[in-house]
Amino acid sequence: MKPSLNMSKSTDPKNNISVSWSSPSNIALIKYWGKHGRQLPRNASISFTLDNAKSITRITMTDLTEDRKTDIEFLFEGQSNPEFAQRISNFIASITEAYFPFLKCKHLKIESSNTFPHSSGIASSASAMSALALCLCDLELQISEKSVYDHDFYQKASLIARLGSGSAARSVYPYVAVWGNHNDVNGSSDLYAISVNDKIHSVFKDFHDDILIISDAKKHVSSTVGHQLMDNNPYATVRYKQANSNFTMLLTALKTGDIATFGKITEDEALTLHALMMCSDPSFILMEPRTLEVINKIRSFRQKTGIHVYFTLDAGPNVHVLYPHSHADEVKLFISNDLIQYCQNGQIIFDQTGNGPVKLA
Ligand code: DP6
């Protein structure tokens, strides 16, 4: 569906509903890489929900007096953005009939912005799609006049976010979320993420994740293409099995507060993700030489000092530096003395695990 410009909106204020949410990005510890059907994961994943890297979205919904199609107007950071607008229009069209029939015959003004620079190379789909999903579910709630932000509300928001971008399913919960069916987690599902926050050791509730921007260039390969490449990857089957057992070990470490095991599994997962891309056909090298320099520095700093500092990577060159709050002073000094020179224009996003989405006025 193309965002259309020709519409006639109702002027009755009752027919104007506006909702707004901020929703954070998340960083996967056990990676989702490989999918099937409509956004169903090949393995269960676990992530930290971040605190500072967020999208803020507002939807203002108005009745249309004519034209039965949902009419979308999309502004990103105050500017119209035809590429994003088209993607969002298509997405909303694909979920209207099944999940939000009330959207028919409505004009939606969607305004979105990020707290992190768009050109930082940080994938914004998790925060953007989760914020959008929360707003859509909130509109539904407003119409029903229930206004109860309960378990079902977040479950539906997670499901809708997943349909927009798989990893977004995990962003609707605080601190630690699981997406994908796994024997170790009751209630886990491929359809939506769930919170495992109440089982997690307190050391992971203020865990730091400083994102070193090694390159702010657009990704070489989209996640969508990356996931597809898993379909013919010769190591796919063994990878999905490995993800399952890494999941078990990581969840145990998160529960018991075992930071060394957490770090080992997290680093293995990051390097496996990149190894899978290197042995795909076509092959992609998503790290930069500076990514490797930073990884080596982190490992030798850890060995020398005994301080728990680890890394993970997304499907790109930037490095997430993970460490407990108790070592924040030493690690921040290490970053500013030894790592910042590898960052493009010295860019770093200082973040940590956080409390999840917030409904805004
Ligand atoms: C490497 O969620 O961006 O970040 O479902 O196609 O939108 P789509 O993919 P996306 O993939 C994320 C891949 C990852 C790992 C992860 O977040 O689990």
Image: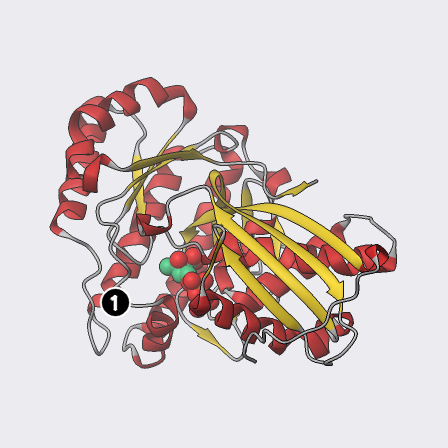
The answer to whether residue 181 of the structure is visible from this angle is no
Q: Nearer the viewer, residue 234 or 320?
A: 320
The answer to whether residue 238 of the structure is visible from this angle is yes
Quarter of the image where one finds residue 191: bottom right
The x and y percentages for residue 296 are: 15, 40
The residue under the point 77% across, 48% down is 149
The residue under the point 54% across, 33% down is 201
Q: How was the colour assigned to the protein in this rendering?
A: secondary structure
Ligand 1 shows up in the quarter that is bottom left
The x and y percentages for residue 355 are: 58, 37
Quadrant showing the N terminus:
bottom right
Residue that lies at the very extreme toward the right in this rendered image: 145
Q: Nearer the viewer, residue 266 or 339?
A: 339
Q: Nearer the viewer, residue 7 or 95?
A: 7
Q: Is residue 285 left or right of residue 204?
A: left
Quadrant showing the C terminus:
top right
- Residue 140 vertical position relative to residue 296 in the rendered view, above or below: below
Amino acid carrying mark 1 in the image: Met
Q: Callout 1: few (<14), some (14-19), or many (20+) C-alpha neighbours within 10 Å?
A: many
The x and y percentages for residue 253 are: 46, 40
Identify the element where label 1 is drawn.
helix
Q: Is residue 243 left or right of residue 103?
A: left
Q: How many marks?
A: 1
- Residue 229 vertical position relative to residue 151 in the rendered view, above or below: below
The residue under the point 16% across, 35% down is 297
Look at mark 1 in the image and give the residue it sits on. 277
- Residue 321 vertical position relative to residue 167 in the rendered view, above or below: above
Q: Nearer the viewer, residue 69 or 146?
A: 69
Q: Is residue 59 left or right of residue 339?
A: right
Q: Is residue 65 left or right of residue 192?
A: right
Quarter of the image where one finds residue 14: bottom right
